[in-house]
Image (cartoon, grey):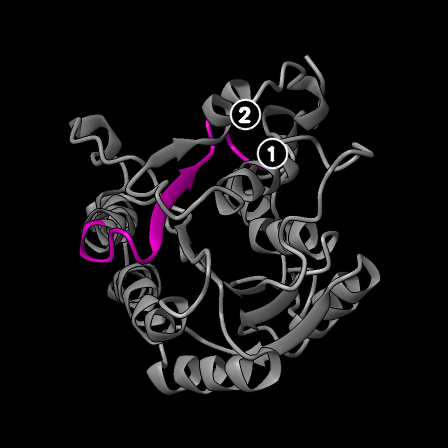
Amino acid sequence: FLPSTSPFTFRKLAGCTLFITGASRGIGKAIALKAAKDGANIVIAAKTAEPHPTLPGTIYTAAEEIEAAGGKALPCIVNVREEQQIINAVEKAVKTFGGIDILVNNASAISLTGTLETATKKVNLMMDVNVRGTYLTSKACLPHLRKSKNPHILNLSPPMNLNPMWFKNHCAYTISKYGMSMCVLGMAEEFRGEVAVNALWPKTAIHTAAMDMLGGAGIEKQCRKTDILADAAYCILTKPKTFTGNFIIDEVLLREEGVKDFDVYAIAPG
């Protein structure tokens, strides 16, 4: 594995088709752009078709960036709460690119609120998008992934740690993200030898529009760029399908791969 700036990088994902949920901005888009540099096909499965009042980017602006980076883009309006929209996008992807090699379950809803402060509609949103959306998107893609030479599912979800500190301040959110991690646990075993299924999670906060909304002004100084997750994801997705059932922390993996300078990923170095 070499950083994207290296002249020695082999175009490992050239011709591969990636189906990425929530790829119109943030981490999903960063993973898409990294793969696009190799000449990959990217299915942008996200719900922002019209510009959002506070969040940057639509599926169409993301498609333009992906094409500019050297990839092929297929923007699809997909709200992962709607199973039919997922199925339609998967069918369109297969028709357009001939198959699906990689699924990145990145779409997520977040509310870091206590039990009494979390509105029911927020609970429903987190469970629907994070757990159910990940499960249904995986289910729709799996028949096509099984036909790929090196298929991967990558969920943006944390290692499962049952220490109550991870639950006490935002019980509903943690349950929903651990639901995604349980999909990794189950599906990695169910499809062992056929499809690799792994989870990726950042060591520190990552600077995205969602983080600005949650953390307010100045939060970015404590954050890393989305590039660190894009580089870690690239590393996982170019491994053989025998690499499965892992819960990976971005920095730990990149250190193992020989990356020493993590200041390049800092918004405010040091």
* Residue that badge 1 annotates: 228
Residue at x 79%, y 68% (from the top left corner): 64
Question: Gap in Å between the C-alphas at discs 2 and 1?
Answer: 9 Å
Q: Quadrant of the N terminus?
A: top right
> Which sits in the foreground, 247 or 111?
247
For this view, does 155 lie left or right of residue 139? Answer: right
| Quarter occupied by residue 270 | top right
* Residue that badge 2 annotates: 254
- The percent position of residue 72, horizontal first and vertical second, equals 72, 70
Q: Is residue 121 above or below residue 69?
A: below
Mark 2 or mark 1, which has the lower sequence index? 1
| Quarter occupied by residue 109 | bottom left
Residue at x 53%, y 43% (from the top left corner): 233
For this view, does 145 lie left or right of residue 269? Answer: left
| Quarter occupied by residue 8 | top right
Local secondary structure at mark 1: helix
> Which sits in the foreground, 139 or 193?
193
Magenta region: which residues?
189-207
Q: Which mark is residue 90?
A: none
- The percent position of residue 134, horizontal first and vertical second, equals 33, 63
Residue 34 drawn in magenta: no
Q: Is residue 111 above or below residue 48?
A: above
Residue 196 drawn in magenta: yes
Q: How many marks?
A: 2
Amino acid found under the numbered disc labelled 2: Leu
> Which sits in the foreground, 238 or 134?
238
Label 2 close to label 1 by CB (< 8 Å): yes
Residue at x 47%, y 33% (from the top left corner): 202
